[in-house]
Image (cartoon, rainbow, N blue to C red):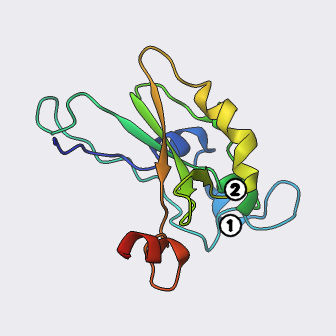
Amino acid sequence: MARHTVEPAIALRAAMPKTDELHCGNPDPNGQAPCQAGYGLCQIVPPPSCAKGGGTTNGRSIGYYQASNTYTRVCNKISPKQIVTTNLTHVYFAFAQFDPTTWAIVPSNSADVPLYTEFTSLKTSSLQTWIAIGGFDFSDPGTSTFTAWYA
């Protein structure tokens, strides 16, 4: 299997407002909560890239969409329709999971379900949409999915 360079969240970075003083030090426009202050770098960090023909991407440019942003962020929530897909060949939706008893693929969160149609509507002849199964705690000891993986 070929290895592929993945540029995580490139689609999200492209869709987010540019990082500037407004987003680094001040509360959100509605005065509800800080948008970025204390939650990351206050600078624009370009995605890594390989020279043309110098990587192992086989022409793939992959974005990663973290669905939970729509229900866990106070600001800068990004719906699938806001993903800037220019120059992407693949976009991954994170996450679905499997039921450890039936092995059926199920939503990670019920709030993800309305996003599926909007996300898959991004698919074109030059852009594939995929769903990633798992998550950061998927194989942690003590979780039901850990037991299923290592049974």
Residue identifier under label 2: 22
Label 2 packing within 10 angstroms: few (<14), some (14-19), many (20+): some
Question: Residue 28: image x %, image y %?
Answer: 79, 58
In this view, the residue in front, 42 or 69, is 69
Among the 4 quarters of the image, the one containing residue 38: bottom right
Residue closest to the far left: 54
User: Is 53 rendered above or below residue 79?
Assistant: above
Residue that numbered label 1 is attached to: 25
Residue 50 visible: yes
Say left or right for 45 vs 20. left
Going 44% across and 14% down the picture, which residue do you hit?
125
Task: Residue at 63%, 63% (x, y): give it.
Answer: 24
Residue type at the position of mark 2: Leu
Kind of residue indicated by mark 1: Gly
Residue at the spot 16% in from the left edge and 42% down from the top edge: 1
Could you tell me how many numbered marks the image carries? 2
Q: Residue at x 68, y 31 (%)?
A: 118
Mark 1 touching mark 2, by CB under 8 A?
A: yes
Q: Residues within 10 Å of mark 1 (few under 14, many from 20)?
A: some
Q: CA distance from mark 1 to mark 2?
A: 6 Å
Looking at the rendering, in which quadrant would you find the C terminus? bottom left
